[in-house]
Image: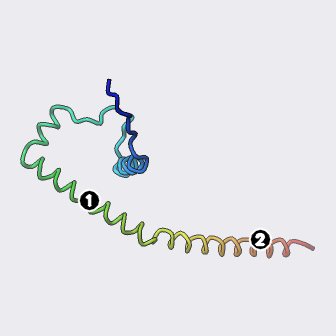
Amino acid sequence: MSSSKPHPLPLGDVLRDLAVLRASDVDLSDGNTFPDAESADSANTADGIQQSVQQSYQFVKEAREALKVHQRGDLDKQGGRLEILRSKLEEVRDGARDDNDKRYVV
């Protein structure tokens, strides 16, 4: 047994990795996360390697775009706009209810 103190994984890195797995639709619960022999053989062909490289480039491109959107705060801005619209629609709805209540009162 080693006498050195164990070093836990940094929480931020673990959370980031889990977020990447979630975003890439990897299901760890099915137990089939590792390729079987047939898919490993097909991945070693030139076409399989090229396809894998293309998928990697696509993943990196999408990840960079997601980070840019996050850093610019576009989602927060859009969420703020949606919240303003939602509150205005609620005001209109409440006003329509008040008008309906007044019509039926005799």
- Residue where numbered disc 1 is placed: 60
Look at discs 2 and 1 and give the one toward the viewer: 1
Q: Earlier in the sequence, mark 2 or mark 1?
A: 1
Of residues 39 and 67, the one nearer the viewer is: 67
Residue, x 39% and y 51% (percent of image)?
A: 16
User: Dot 1, how many residues are within 10 Å of its Cα: few (below 14), some (14-19), or many (20+)?
Assistant: few
Q: Nearer the viewer, residue 104 or 16?
A: 16
Q: CA distance from mark 2 to mark 1?
A: 51 Å
Q: Quadrant of residue 34 in the image?
A: top left
Residue visible at 71% across and 74% down in the picture: 91
Kindly identify which numbered label has been placed on residue 97.
Answer: 2
The residue lying toward the viewer, choosing from 23 and 8, is 8
Q: Position of residue 72 (x, y in %)?
A: 42, 72
* Percent position of residue 26, x then y: 34, 44
82 relative to 69 in the view: left or right: right
Q: Is residue 96 above or below residue 26?
A: below
Point 21% across, 54% down: residue: 55
Q: Is residue 102 left or right of residue 53?
A: right
Hey, which residue is sitting farthest right in the picture? 106
